[in-house]
Structures are given as C-alpha cells and as structure tokens.
Amino acid sequence: MAGEVAVTMAVQMLGELASQKVSLMLGVEKKVKELRDELEKMQSVLRRAADRPTDDERVLKWVSDIRDIAHDTEDLIESFSVNVVDAPRRRRGALLGRCASFPVKMYQLFILGHEIESIQKRLERMDDMRARYPTPSLDEASPVSSNGIELRRRVSPWHQDKHVVGLEGHVETILKKAILVKKGGLFISSIVGMGGVGKSTLATKVYNDAAIHKQFEQRAWVTVSQNFNLKELLKTLLLQLKKGENMENYPVEHLEQKVNECLKGKQYFIVLDDVWQQQSYECIVRAFPDETDKASRLLITSRYHNIPNAARYVHELKGLDPNQSWELFLKTAFVENKDGKCPKELEDIGRKIVNKCKGLPLAISVMGGLLLNQGQSVSGWERVWKGMTTHYGTQDHDMNAILELSYRDLPSHLKSCFLFFSFYKEDVKINVKTLIHLWIAEGVVPRGEGEETMEEVGMNYLDELINRNMVQVSMVSADGRVISCQMHDHLRDLSIRRANEEMNVDIVNDENSLEDQRPVKVRHLVAFGNIERVVSLRTRNPHLRSLIFHSSTRHSIIPSSVWKRLGERLKALELRDFEVTKLHSRIGKLSGLKYLHLSCFEMQKLPRSLGRLKNLQTLRIDRGMDLEVPNVIWKLDGLRHLYMLRKIICKEPLRLDTLKNLQTLVGVSTKNIVVDHLAKLVNLRELSLIVGEDVDKIFTLLATLKKLDDVALDWYWNDDQRQIYLLNEIVNLCAVSQLSISGKVVELPNSFARNISHLTLWYNHLTQDPMPMLGRLPNLISLNLHNNSYVGEKVVVLKSAFPKLRVLRLLYLRRLKEIYIAKEGVPMPQLRELEVKCCRHLEIIPKEEEMMILKSLQMLKISETSKKIDIKFKGDDYSSILSKIPYAVVTTEFV
C-alpha cells in the first residue's frame, strides 16, 4: 500500500506556495491553505493504512485515489510556480516585465483556483464514499509508530567497526583452506549463502587481511551483480591494477588482453562479488592467467552453490547463532549506551525480535536501527514487536517483511529520501554531494533554519538513514565525513518497489522489455543500458519530473522529437554516454529544471538558451575536452553548484557577479572568468580554480569570502615552467579548512591559516623539507604529499609535531630516500593511517622503536619502494610493530 510520500510532497509544496503569498486576489491563498489542511488530515489516515497491510479492495482503491490527487496537486503547483512565481525573473525589464506578466498572472490564478476547487470536490466525494462504506483498517490505531520522535543527530556507528560479529573463525578457515594453501596455479573458491547473510562483509574481511597483502602482488575487487556488463567490469579491474589510461574506446577483447598483461607473471588475489550467473563468471574469468608457478587466488560470493562450478573450495555462510545475533543487536540498537547493554525491562522483547530475524545480519542491523530510533521506550519496542507479529504471524522469517517494517517506521521526509536511491545502479558507490543535490532539486529537502543550508539539512537526513542501517557507507574522510555511500541489494529492491508505487518511478534496463507493466503516469524515468527505444517511447509523457539516462553504447542519440516533448515540470535531467556534440537549444524551454548533469564525451558546445534556466540549482558537466561555454552562466541566478570538470573554451570571460547563491564552483580557470567577480560570490563554500596570473590578487579576493571552506588551486596545467615564489597571502584564508595546492612553488609560506585541517600538495617541487613547518599546524588532520610535491631526499618529523594528524600519505616522491620520526616528544600521537607509495629510492625508514611511538596507528601501507625496505620488513626487525597494526602491508610491487 502506498500514497504517504506523494501526499507529503504535495503538502510541502502547498505550504511553500502559501508562505510565498503570491497574491490575495480571487481568494486563491485561502483555497491553497484549505487544500493543504485537507491533505494533512489524509496523511494520518494513510499512515494507519500503510501499517495495516490489507487486501480490502476499498482501502486499496482509496489509497490509489489519494495518491493520484496528490500527484495532480504537485503538477498543478509546479506549473503555477513556473508560470507565475518564477516568471518575472525570466522577463527583461522590471516595469515592462511586470506589465507584460499581469494578464498571464490573472489567467494562471483563475486556473489555479478552479483546479483547486476541482481537487477539493474529488476529496469530498472520497469522504462521502468512505462514510457510506466504512473501512475499519483506515480508522484503527497503528500498531507501529515512530511515536513522534524527532530527527536528531548522533555519533554515527560507521566510525567504529562494531557491526561485524561472528566472522573471525570464517576468515581463518577461508585463509587456511582456500587462500594460503600451498598450491600453484589459479585456485578458485566461493562464499555462498542467502541474501543478507553477510557474504560480502566476510569477503571484505578476507580481502583486507594482512596475510593477503603480504602474499599477493596484485589485488582487485569487482562487483558483478545481476546487471552484468563485462566491459565496465574489465575497466574497473584495470583501474585497480594500475592501468588507468583512457579506456573509453577499447573493445572488450583489448580490455581482456590488458587485464591479462597486468596479472601475468604475478601472484594475484581477486574478489568477484555478487555473481548471479555461471555465464557471467565464465565471461570475466577468461582474462585471468593460470600459471602453475604462480599461486594466485580467485574468491567469488554468490547466492548459488553451483556458481562457479569450477570452485575447488565452497564456504557456506549461514546465519549467526543466538549469542552472536544478540551481540550484533546490542551493537546496533544501543549505539548511544556507553556500556552497550540492554535494560532488563527490554531484554525479553528484544530477544523475541532478534529470534524473528533468524540470524541474518542485515535483518538484525536494520531492526536494531529501527529500535534505536524508538529510544529505550518499552511501549515503543512493544509496538514494533506487535507490528512484526500482526503482519507476519507465525510464518517463517521473511527478509522483505523485516525491511518493509523498517521502511514504514521512517518519518515521511526520510521515506522520500530513501526512495530516490532507486535512481542508482545496483552496487554503485553514490557520491553524497550529488545525491543531496538531487534531493534538493526534487523538493524533498526543506530550507534550513537560521544559517543552516539545505545541503546541511540533507546531510542530516542521510546521517539518519545511515544510523538506521538503511544505507551503507562506502568512503569516509579523515575527519569522519561521509564521501560516498551505497545500498544493500535487498534494500535497493525495496526502494525500487516502493518508488514504483509511491512516486510512479519507472526503472528500465536491458533486461526489461518495453511491454512490461509500468506505472500509468510515469513521473520519474530511469533507464540504463541500450535505451534508444526507451528514450523515444517513454518520454511521451507530460507528467515527467525526472529523466536519468545512462546509455551503455557511445553511439546512443537523443532525437529532436524527444526534446520537444519535455516540458516545464521536468526538474532533474541526467545524460551519460550519449553521442551528443551539442546540447539541443530547446533545453532553455525546460523552465522548471533544477538539476542538470551532462556526461557526454563528444559534447563540444553549450547553447545560449541555457541562460533561460532561472530555476537551475546544480549544473554538472564532465568527461571530454574543449567544451565551448557561452557567457550566459550569470543569468542562472538560482545556481547553487557549478561543476565544469573538463577544459572549457570561452569567447569572452564569463560573468559571475550575479551568482549570489553559488556555494560550489569547481573546474574553472581564471582566464575564462571575470576574476574580480569572485569577491561577489558571498555564499561560496567550495572552490576549485585553475590559476593564471596574479596569484596574490586571487588570494586577496578569496580572503573576503567568509564562508569559503574548501579551496583547490592549480597552476600546474597552465604552464609547466611557471613557478610561484611565495604564498604568504595564504594565511589570510582564515575560514578555509581544506586546501589543495598544485603547481611549482619555490618554498612554502611562513605560515598557513590555523584553521587548516586537510592539506594536499601536488607537483610543487619543494626543495626544503616541508615537515618542520607543517608539523606546527595545530588542527591538521590529513596531510597528502603527492607527485613530487617535495623533491628532496629526506623528511624529518620533529618531536611534538602534528598534534592532531590522523592520515599521512607520501606518494610518488621519487627522490625521497630517508624518513625519520623523532623518538621523543610524542610526534603524531593521533596518527591512524600511514601510506608510503612509489618512493622508489627510499632506503631508510623509522626503526621499529620509533614506529612504536605511533600508538594510534591502525593502517600501514608501504608499496612500490626499494627492495631494501621489503627485506627489512620481512626480517625480524619489524615483527612486533607489524603484529600490533590491524592492517599492515609492505610490498615492492612496481608499475
């Protein structure tokens, strides 16, 4: 049963329209508020209906009608907003624009009032029918409820490795029987078990084990999934195997050869995660060499015992035992308890809930997240238990039923956010910023209170979904911020099912035929694969609000007829891998568009009509080279995020002075913009800039931007010979906490702003050891020295240096020979991760007693250095430190 999300979004839009007070004429404002109040009443009834699944056709029909009314309300408000509320911004001349818009405004107000009356009559008829034919399941109290618990921010559980229980013995068994066996050639093993049992988690533990890193020269992990795409998998493999050149035009046969070349003559360990078909396995395994003198290993995870049929060892993973299940439950349901114990008054009901999960980690984690949100309330826990028994009785465990229960417990705004995960491919890692920008464009994130931005509100929403274990974290920054996330297959399936019902989302891929049953009024169309027919047929729909197209062939095109069908209601448009050299000029007709992502390699030019998109909030253009951009960006005064992740060409410098709402500006060069306009971007928070002349002027301008937090400056690509002598003005960037500098610098400035927490240096060719000066930065958390940022032979970490540093990476410092750490003064007391890579002349590293000072070290990675380093670590000199570091690997692997 569905409908609540649709009504919630309609109520939110009506509330925003009423708050804008567009006009008091014709009594429209009153009608808007009355309709909002009526739909709010329907919301509470819909929540009760959702918590009591039923086959009663009267209830199903009532919910379906309400959802249709909510969608029609959205369309009505959206059209009115585009044609009236935002229209004056699109017309030139203040007085002339107001005069010209007056008749249009009167007509649109009349239409709005008339349509609202029509919707209210439909609601009245539904109330009459419900009174005439009572439906008890709509009127009884709900057995499961969030009980009004408001959204709150917590310490998120992803910061700690607390959600893994009962896998230690399994890891040891797999290592002993399948990975570390003394057999030459390619040894194939598999982990099998039902969905949600923890196969991928176990494979991850094996993959990251120190023994794996020590024995194998090459490692890689690829997720196969149901929608198998051999070319994309091979490209993913090559990127991990250090052959990351442009592979866009390579045929599959060439990619297979490249993979084989990377692995030949080496011992390698590869994980193929989530394999669904024997045929998929056979296609990809062709690329792996099988050499009798090299002990290489292939580990597969699958739900099926006979995949692959060539496996020499099969490890079946079953559910957790009762004690392990209870342990995992405590770690997910009592994150906020210091002792992690369950109060006695909750233990009996908690154990009954855990038993219902039948030992499946995913089910236990999700239920733990649900109960965490209930607080330690006996009545709240009893409602959850009653909901489980009411819906599922005494039937055997059903994973989908557990997840459905957790979904129903989400507040309406989190349900809306959850459903948009259906837009993403299976097992894909989702960029958090992109996700939140899409949420904002689709209207599911409200304005923040006070100084809080919508982006910060959206991040709070994502935090809550993570806390409830509905979303998994893929990558976290050094200071704990989530960079990317993903969703378990079962939960993604749930989001697709619910999105289809609640939001009329249509998901199409190569395996779906166009004759499949689809929503009657498709509002969001998401298509993956060879989708030219989809583009042509499915876009004949006036209700579309989102179009997400990911083509699997570089030669897909979008016919002109499609552009003519797209209308003002479209809010989000994403095009990937289409053969488009020039964006159609009709893009300017999509006046309601708020999110535009173009990833088309051949695109050469943007049309001037782009400047008509006054409602556009996010513009992201990536992949390809030499894109001509007209001077119309300044007209997009609603723009919040601008990404130009490719080389752009401008006939004249781009104006930026009108972009008062801009928070993100990434990928532009100072030669392509009016530099003085940077000072006008008062809300700018993130800036990535290719710098030409007048570096000092740039720093002076940036120092005036009080909200600027993340800055990346690059002058390396402009002129390889150009050098910056001093960067002393950098100390004036008082608000900046994340800083990246790429380009030649004779020496570092005398000091940095004390607020700097993340610092990355690239291609700087510094001749003096930067560690003494950088070690004094009091708030530095992450330091990355990349690609000859330092060209000296020795670095020294002085005593008491880097008091808050957690991550230190020394990468591709090709002349570096010696690394020293002071034994006194406790340097780097909080260091967790130390990586040294491709410093091929490195011969001297800190002795074991010096390394032992690093009490917090959890990860040590040394690779592609000299043989001398490898010999030292393989001896007894470093045995103690290696045994105490959870994740340590030292290899002499060379590209």
Image (cartoon, rainbow, N blue to C red):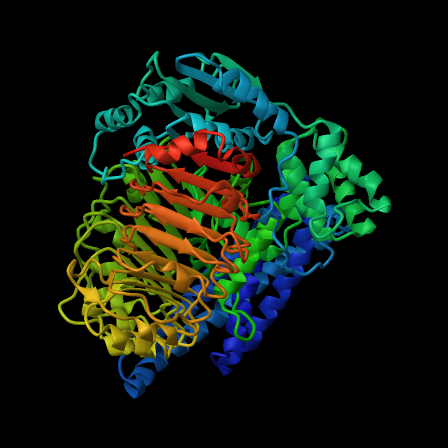
Q: Residue furthest right?
A: 345
Q: Nearer the viewer, residue 336 or 796?
A: 796
Q: Give the vertical position of 634 relative to 537 (above or below).
A: below
Q: In the figure, residue 676 lies in which quadrant?
A: bottom left
Q: Nearer the viewer, residue 604 or 723?
A: 723
Residue at the image point whose x is 23% and y is 50% from the top: 561
Query: How far across and how far down the image is residue 237, in percent?
Result: 34, 32
Query: How far across and how far down the image is residue 63, in percent?
Result: 61, 49
Query: Is 146 left or right of 703, judged from the image as shown?
Result: right
Task: State whether residue 85 appears in this view.
Answer: yes
Residue at the image point whose x is 42% and y is 44% from the top: 835
Q: Give the vertical position of 656 relative to 558 (above or below).
A: below
Residue at the image point whose x is 31% and y is 88% from the top: 95
Q: Nearer the viewer, residue 416 or 284?
A: 284
Number of marks in picture: 0
Q: In the figure, residue 498 lies in which quadrant?
A: top right
Query: How far across and how far down the image is residue 753, in percent?
Result: 42, 71
Query: Is 283 left or right of 155, judged from the image as shown?
Result: left
Query: Is 750 left or right of 402, judged from the image as shown?
Result: left
Q: Residue furthest bottom?
A: 95
Residue at the image point whose x is 82% and y is 49% from the top: 378
Q: Nearer the viewer, residue 39 or 574?
A: 574
Task: State whether residue 55 appears in this view.
Answer: no
Q: Residue furthest left?
A: 651
The quadrant in which the C terminus is found is: top left
Q: Give the vertical position of 366 relative to 182 (above or below).
A: below
The quadrant in which the N terminus is found is: top right
Query: How far across and how far down the image is residue 673, in percent?
Result: 22, 71
